[in-house]
Image: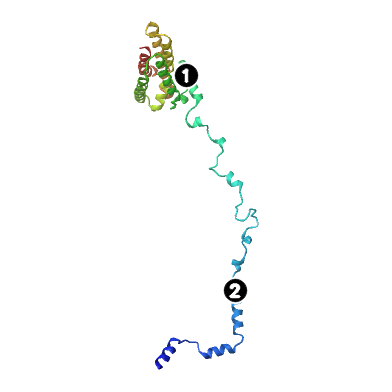
Amino acid sequence: MSNLGQFDSDFYQSNYTIENQEQSGNEPHAYGNLYESRKQQASEQPPSAFIPSEMFIPSGYSGQFLQPESNPDYYSQSSYIDSFDEEPPLLEELGINFDHIWQKTLTVLNPLKPADGSIMNETDLTGPILFFVALGTTLLLAGKVQFGYVYGMSAIGCLGIHGLLNLMSSSGVSYGCVASVLGYCLLPMVILSSCAIFFSLQDTFGTVLALVVIGWCSLSASKIFISALDMEGQQLLIAYPCALLYGLFALLTVF
């Protein structure tokens, strides 16, 4: 039993004694002082947790709670918002300019008209594609299926003229510009192939007409090239290979 009493005294060992309890009981104002100290600490803390959220809203704010105020100046000054009126037309974005197409067509139809180098030095393939399709269609109406020959000779001829012009000119020229000029100058050949629908060209009149059309095409192409590349005095040198190319198209048309 003595061991059990020693175990209890060791297990419940503490600094708190009965004397301390009697002393605290004899002091009637102990709990009152404790309450006053806690109340003073609570009054010293900032009452931020008890302030309503409406007091944090600035006085100049006119929107509703949890809803931002709309600012029209922000949207009007944004650089990424563009109106539809400021956007370019769709045909201009695709590189199709009907005014330039019409001017180039008139330049080809009138070999004596001076060419505008700023307009002719463009990679516009809208007109050439239309003229190639028109040439193949007129040959088809004349009973000649020659679409493959038309596009094949056009590609090879553009490569040859492109290499020749780069050797002759100091500024150089792009392949698209050469294809555009040669394609526009194919318009007189379309007129010749249209004549082949109604009558045969395998006679003297047809031969003379074919020679005139070849000279017409080569003269227009050489005029445009010397105007776009500033190659004055070299028109005959450029007209000769162009005449050879258009002579192949004339052979397809006549025979």
Q: Of residues 219 and 32, which is closer to you in this image?
A: 32
Q: Is residue 57 left or right of residue 218?
A: right
Q: Of residues 132 and 213, which is closer to you in this image?
A: 132
Amino acid of disc 2: Ala
Q: Secondary structure at mark 1?
A: helix
Q: Of residues 59 and 145, which is closer to you in this image?
A: 145
Q: Of residues 121 and 210, which is closer to you in this image?
A: 210
Q: Position of residue 216 (x, y in %)?
A: 42, 14
Image quadrant where one finds the C terminus: top left
**Residue farthest along the bottom direction in this orientation:** 2
Q: Earlier in the sequence, mark 1 or mark 2?
A: 2
Classify 10 Å Cα crowding around label 2: few (below 14), some (14-19), many (20 and above).
few
Q: In the image, is residue 77 above or below residue 155? A: below
Instruction: Give me the disc on residue 11.
Output: none
Image quadrant where one finds the N terminus: bottom left
Classify 10 Å Cα crowding around label 1: few (below 14), some (14-19), many (20 and above).
many
Q: In the image, is residue 142 above or below residue 126? A: above
Q: CA distance from mark 1 to mark 2?
A: 96 Å
Q: In the image, is residue 65 above or below residue 38? A: above
Q: Is residue 160 left or right of residue 24?
A: left
- Residue 38 is at least partly visible in this image: yes
Residue that badge 1 annotates: 107
Amino acid of disc 1: Thr
Residue at 45% from the left image edge and 18% from the top image edge:
108
Q: Position of residue 182 (x, y in %)?
A: 40, 21
Quadrant housing residue 40: bottom right
Residue at 51% from the left image edge and 32% from the top image edge:
90
Residue that badge 2 annotates: 42
- Could you tell me how many numbered marks the image carries? 2
Q: In the image, is residue 187 above or below residue 47? A: above
Q: Position of residue 208 (x, y in %)?
A: 39, 8
Q: Secondary structure at mark 2?
A: helix
